[in-house]
Amino acid sequence: MEKALKINLQFGGGAELLFDKIKKREIELANVKKYYPDVETDRWTIRQLLIWIKDNLLKERPELFLQNGSVRPGILVLINDADWELMGELDYELQDSDTILFISTLHGG
């Protein structure tokens, strides 16, 4: 049996308000094909993770977190403290014990 992938998710800068005000979560992801049988890879990517987050964790106003299949502009994404743009963005393949941090830079006024 394949071992589940353990990922640390963190939400800050107001993004946690969309997730029941919970800033940190450790999640376990089973084989990606269990959730998304049509994907071409057996590896979880940020692209599939965002869909999983929307379906399983996002409590309200998904338009404030996601837009056009990615995080909405104004949300910084860090993978193990590195900007996700340096890591391949949506195509980054998740590794066991990765920490994915979503920080909202959007503020109302």
Image (tube, rainbow, N blue to C red):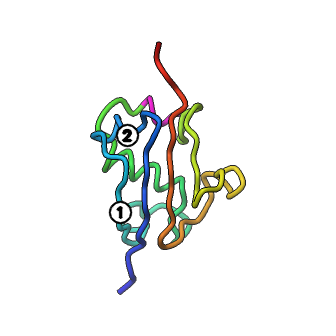
Q: From what the image shows, is residue 109 above or below residue 3?
A: above
Distance between the alpha carbons at the discs numbered 2 and 1 = 16 Å
The answer to which of 21 and 46 lies nearer the viewer is 21
* Residue beneath the point at 37% across and 53% down: 24
- Secondary structure, mark 1, is strand
| Left or right: 42 in relation to 57 | right
| Left or right: 76 in relation to 2 | right
Q: Is residue 31 magenta?
A: no
* Residue beneath the point at 58% across and 41% down: 76
Please state which amino acid type lies under the numbered disc 1: Ile
State the image coordinates of residue 91 (x, y, percent, origin top left). 62, 57
* Residue beneath the point at 45% across and 41% down: 12
Check residue 27 in the rendering and tell me which mark sits there, or answer none.
Answer: 1
- Residue pointed to by mark 2: 16
Please state which amino acid type lies under the numbered disc 2: Glu
Task: Look at the image and give the residue range highlighted in magenta.
Answer: 63-67
State the image coordinates of residue 69 (x, y, percent, origin top left). 53, 41
